[in-house]
């Protein structure tokens, strides 16, 4: 029998989340003793949940851009350029050129959170961003982590993946399961892939979140995407944008052959607003090596 997993639904979380339409400064959320406690626990557990992080109007803009990204074929062309760079042309558009996606990559409330010493600290760089929409009933993804290091050698510098569930999570969309503490292991990304998407002792299962929510993962944390329910009601597509950031201090491996163009877009759009001067600087990266395209949960 599979071990039971603690389930996370937004109504059971202790993170403050205001009703729809209520405006609030994110600094008030950070100041909350509950959220502050979860930030302090990040090094131990390797994840934290931020329900309702993004304002509703912003969520609407992002949703329309994801639909365009998927329906126009831009997403598939970006994947092809990563998986088969010798045969496929570079994409005409990158994610950060979409207005709201670029704003999300440099969303000030999120970057302010990441500046905490328990997360990345004040010096960090944008690594990559993926955008996707998956239908109900889509297959899952086996247990894995996304820490970029070849080969895996240490965990001296943190890297995080911020999984933005812009339309939230509901049963049938495909739950996210995480294995708290597993980011302290030095293991290859696929070290648990032979376990498929099955339940593991000690896992935390996140099944429900309100729109605009985010889950912040230490990139070395093992996690899995469970399969969606094909019988789920219409309109339960799983929208997710994942953005990744790294503490500076060594050269990080890029995951896309056109990584320089992505960073250049960030600089040209001045997405760091002058507050995060290193956010899109090339000097924090090493040489691109074809291989894993960095797909997240």
Image: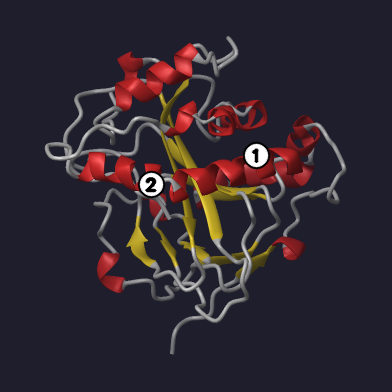
Give 94 or 130, whichever is nearer the viewer: 94
In the rendered image, residue 293, in percent from the top left (x then y), is placed at 28, 44
* Dot in front, 2 or 1: 2
Does residue 271 show up?
Answer: yes
Q: How far apart are marks 2 and 1 (CA)?
A: 19 Å
Q: In which quarter of the image is the C terminus?
A: bottom left
Left or right, 190 with reference to 34: left
In the rendered image, residue 57, in percent from the top left (x then y), is placed at 74, 40
Q: For numbered disc 2, what is the local secondary structure?
A: loop
Does residue 59 lie above or below 191 as drawn? above
Asked if the residue at tag 1 contacts the one at tag 2, i.e. Cβ–Cβ closer than 8 Å, the answer is: no
Give residue 61's mark: 1
Give 183 or 63, whichever is nearer the viewer: 63
Residue 78 is drawn in which quadrant?
top left
- In the picture of the structure, the residue carrying the numbered disc 2 is 73
Give 108 or 259, whichever is nearer the viewer: 259
Does residue 40 show up?
Answer: no
Count of marks placed on residues: 2
The structure residue drawn at horizontal position 40% and vertical position 31%, both measured from the top left corner, is 94
In the rendered image, residue 129, in percent from the top left (x then y), is placed at 43, 37
Give 260 or 207, whichever is nearer the viewer: 260
Residue 193 is drawn in which quadrant?
bottom left
């Amino acid at each position: 029998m599979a071990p039971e997993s603690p389930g996370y639904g937004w109504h059971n979380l202790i993170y403050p989340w205001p009703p729809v339409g209520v405006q609030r400064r994110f600094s008030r959320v950070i100041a909350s003793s509950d959220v502050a406690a979860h930030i302090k626990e990040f090094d131990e557990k390797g994840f934290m949940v931020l329900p309702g992080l993004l304002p509703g109007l912003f969520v609407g803009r992002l949703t329309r851009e994801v639909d365009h990204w998927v329906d126009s074929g831009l997403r598939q062309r970006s994947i092809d350029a990563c998986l088969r760079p010798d045969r496929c042309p570079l994409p005409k558009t990158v994610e950060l050129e979409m207005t709201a996606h670029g704003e999300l990559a440099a969303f000030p409330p999120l970057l302010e959170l990441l500046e905490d010493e328990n997360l990345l600290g004040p010096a960090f760089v944008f690594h990559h961003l993926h955008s996707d929409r998956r239908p109900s009933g889509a297959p899952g993804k086996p247990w894995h982590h996304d820490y970029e290091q070849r080969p895996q050698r240490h965990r001296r510098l943190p890297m995080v993946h911020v999984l933005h569930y812009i339309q939230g999570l509901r049963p049938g969309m495909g739950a996210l399961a995480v294995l708290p503490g597993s980011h302290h292991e030095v293991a290859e990304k696929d070290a648990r892939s032979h376990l498929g998407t099955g339940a593991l002792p000690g896992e935390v299962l996140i099944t429900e979140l309100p729109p605009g929510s985010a889950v912040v993962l230490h990139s070395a944390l093992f996690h899995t995407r469970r399969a969606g329910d094909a019988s789920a009601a219409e309109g339960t597509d799983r929208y997710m944008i994942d953005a990744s950031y790294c503490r500076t201090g060594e050269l990080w491996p890029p995951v896309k052959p056109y990584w320089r163009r992505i960073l250049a877009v960030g600089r040209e759009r001045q997405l760091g607003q002058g507050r995060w001067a290193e956010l899109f600087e090339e000097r924090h990266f090493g040489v691109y090596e074809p291989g894993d395209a960095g797909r997240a949960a």
